[in-house]
């Protein structure tokens, strides 16, 4: 990934949470671009090049996906399943980023091969710190396989 633009896919229906994530990643120059999706269906359409996202060159593969669980149209767990069951997308790291601390949600996410499960802190400073750490880990320190589309 050296020299390659970093693309984060953010699937989050809460506009305030999304704005905070985007600002934090951009502020620290962790990501070159963040593609934000408000629902699970549009995220899947993007990943699988359907509809308005049908041109792969214009809709590149993300380096990491930040995925909320409670989403309109297609639930986050169903998005996760689709990503991890498909050869072309299963190696993309998926970080569940949600408000749910419920053990059943954590278990379902990991059962469906989430790479990480993070609970959004309530406080602004704590949330910002989490985003800083997440960005540095997944986009700076972590090594992913090179996959050609």
Image (cartoon, rainbow, N blue to C red):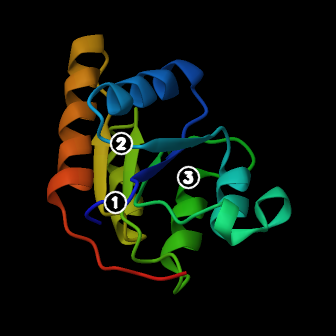
The residue positioned 18% from the left and 62% from the top of the image is 142
For label 2, the SS is: loop
Disc 2 target residue: 102
Q: Name which of mark 3 and mark 1 comes first in the sequence.
A: 3
Residue 35 at least partly seen? yes
Marks 3/2: CA distance?
Answer: 15 Å
Q: Farthest right residue?
A: 51
Q: Position of residue 33 (x, y in %)?
A: 48, 43
Residue 123 at least partly seen? no
65 and 97: which is toward the camera:
65
For label 3, the SS is: helix
The residue positioned 40% from the left and 54% from the top of the image is 5
The N terminus: image quadrant: bottom left
Disc 1 target residue: 107
76 and 11: which is toward the camera:
11
Relative placement, left or right, of 135 versus 63 is left
Q: Few, some or many C-alpha atoms within 10 Å of disc 3 (few <14, some 14-19, many ≥20)?
A: many
The residue positioned 40% from the left and 32% from the top of the image is 99
Q: Position of residue 93 (x, y in %)?
A: 36, 64
Q: Nearer the viewer, mark 3 or mark 2?
A: 3
Q: Farthest bottom residue?
A: 87
The tag on residue 76 is: 3
Q: Farthest left residue?
A: 141
Q: How many marks?
A: 3
Q: Position of residue 57 (x, y in %)?
A: 66, 68
């Amino acid at each position: 990934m050296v020299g390659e633009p970093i693309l984060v896919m953010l699937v989050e229906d809460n506009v305030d949470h999304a704005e905070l994530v985007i600002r934090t990643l951009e502020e620290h120059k962790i990501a070159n671009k963040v593609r934000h999706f408000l629902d699970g269906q549009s995220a899947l359409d993007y990943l699988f090049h359907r509809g308005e996202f049908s041109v792969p060159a214009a809709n590149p593969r993300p380096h990491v996906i930040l995925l909320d669980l409670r989403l309109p149209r297609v639930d986050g767990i169903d998005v996760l399943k689709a990503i991890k069951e498909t050869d072309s997308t299963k190696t993309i790291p998926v970080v569940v980023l949600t408000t749910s601390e419920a053990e059943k949600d954590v278990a379902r996410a990991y059962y469906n091969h989430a790479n990480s499960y993070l609970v959004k802190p309530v406080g602004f400073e704590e949330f910002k710190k989490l985003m800083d750490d997440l960005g540095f880990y997944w986009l700076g320190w972590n090594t992913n396989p090179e996959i050609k589309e």
